[in-house]
Image: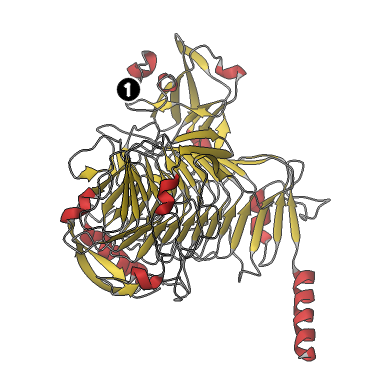
Amino acid sequence: MKELQLVLILLILSFMVSAKEYHVSKTGSDKNSGIVDSPFLTIQAAANVAQPGDIITVHEGVYRERIRPVRGGESEAKRIVYRAAEDEIVEIKGSEVIKDWKKFSGTVWKTIVPNSLLEEYNPYKDLIKGDWFNDLGRIHHTGEVYLNGKSFWEMPLLEKVLNPETVKDNWDPEGSTFTWFCESDMKNTYIYANFHDSDPNNELVEINVRRSCFYPEKTGINYITISGFRMSQAATQWAPPTAEQIGLIGTNWSKGWIIEDNIISNSKCSGITLGKHGDEFDNTSENSAEGYVETIKRALAKGWSKENIGSHIIRNNTISDCGQTGICGSMGGVFSTIENNNIYNIWTKRQFTGAEMGGIKIHASIDMLIKNNRLSNCGRGLWLDWMAQGTRVTGNLLYNNTSDDIFVEVNHGPFLIDNNILLSDLAIRDWSEGGAYVHNLIAGNIELRPQSRETPFQLPHSTEVGGLRTTKCGDNRFYNNIFIGGAEEGQMRFSGLKVYNSAELPMFVDGNVYLNGANTFDNEKNSLVINYNPNIKISRYPDEAYISMNFKKDIQKMNNKLITSSILGKAIIPNQAYENVDGLPLKVEYDYFGTKRNTNNPTAGPFENPEEGVILKAWEKISIK
């Protein structure tokens, strides 16, 4: 035993001696050695020499570059770490400053950008396109114009820049009159922008020029950590599930990344991507389920497995002002954790749309943990599309999302959604089966729609396909939730559990509370109906959110069960148990705040034994630094 301990100590000491720390500074030079007294000038210079186990520390300043890591680490213990120096503000931008604006007409200014500046990538020629993208009848470029960090609205005609009108159906009417238009020839790109009362030559005006801020060219660049940066203004392309997904930050078909404590904003399309590899079949699916099934087959041939792909950690980031998604991933996010992120103002301009939008949008969330995130003003909050199996969504706060809070599409289960607060008008859009909804606070309606598409389920805790089935809907478990009526109902969407009274597959329902006229489930024997409005309100701050509600102690008179694997049983289609990712039985034994539940009679809803009139801190940003 002592000999083994000595060997381990020697190995650790050997690793510590061999690992290096490289420094990057705006006062450095790429001809330097990279040590603390001789730093590099660019982050890419450090990326070119860093080896597994090395740390790259970047010092204060604005770095206008795209980092392409040429190698990754070897393991969790021997990764390559990119970090901002402690207590220093480090920005990585996909933009360049433009100063030589000339008056064109009225408050509209014009600048001429030589195409040589955009030689690698010209976002003012590149159109947003791809599978499941809807341009709403006009063109959209991947470029953007920013005034003091705030993005403008692209117009398809110069006339609409000269005479701007408020853009309909967006969340910033005043901002939508700050507009731009572009055109290009063989030598130059011409950008026109309406700055209203501002002189762009006396302000910070930037334009997107890079496809991303941090994204490897090759797949299989594993075990990288990115920590503490501010990253913004990338000219990202549409990220469809059937093509390579390039985000402002992206993992590009790899394993074991940690993306933490960053502030990510102003990606034309997506902020963080955990997506699939690129191949010659990108964007050739004809927007069909059959096309995506073929994409899955190619992914399996490309090494899609727990051994090679996924197992990322995305935590404690602030992600905002992205045109498509805050976080998205098609198959590349399997076995990952997305935790304690603040995601807001996604798809707020609404100038284009498509079937790949949301605060978090994941295809194949196999054995993923999505925990303690705040998702607001995202259009759609969380979208789990295809192959949500072994997924757990717990302790999240979702509100003010105009499409829905949670959309589960053509999944067959088992997946668990527990201890969440869902406050938007449409809380759950259910086009799936095999879900377990436990101890949630659900203030909006539920929509139910069976699907004729044949979609896969996997073998337990695996990417291997076990079969294809259509989605009949039902086979859901609703235990110990609180439902609140009051949102406007419509076809196929109602408050409470009314939509499931006609579900084709069996339902398992017990211990739920129905407030303010929420509709009950016909065959539920143990339920509580109280006709009062709890008057839920959210108080929002950048790093905190509070929820106030009138909670009546009558709710605690119920006789509820602690929810476990044995109660949840097995999802019908895959014939698989609701269990932890390690295959062991699960218990929903802690509440939204991590408080241990009364195992004999747990309180319905996400909060265990709250006071009658209560104000609770529903979300708080946690930094690991």
- Measured as percent of width and height from the top left, residue 11 is found at 75, 79
Element under disc 1:
loop
- Left or right: residue 501 compared with residue 362: left
- Outermost residue, top side: 106
- Measured as percent of width and height from the top left, residue 59 is found at 73, 45
- Measured as percent of width and height from the top left, residue 149 is found at 55, 29
In the rendered image, the quadrant that contains the N terminus is: bottom right
Q: Where 477 falls versus 617 (above or below)?
A: below
Q: Which residue does the numbered mark 1 point to in the structure image?
A: 157
Which residue is at 44% across, 74% downward? 585
- Outermost residue, right side: 37
- Measured as percent of width and height from the top left, residue 6 is found at 80, 85
Name the quadrant containing residue 186. top left
Which residue is at 39% across, 42% downward? 324
The amino acid type of the residue labelled 1 equals Leu
Which residue is at 46% across, 38% downward? 549
Q: Where 301 falls versus 476 (above or below)?
A: below
- Left or right: residue 491 compared with residue 400: left
Q: Nearer the viewer, residue 347 or 14?
A: 347
Q: From this viewpoint, is residue 360 visible?
A: no
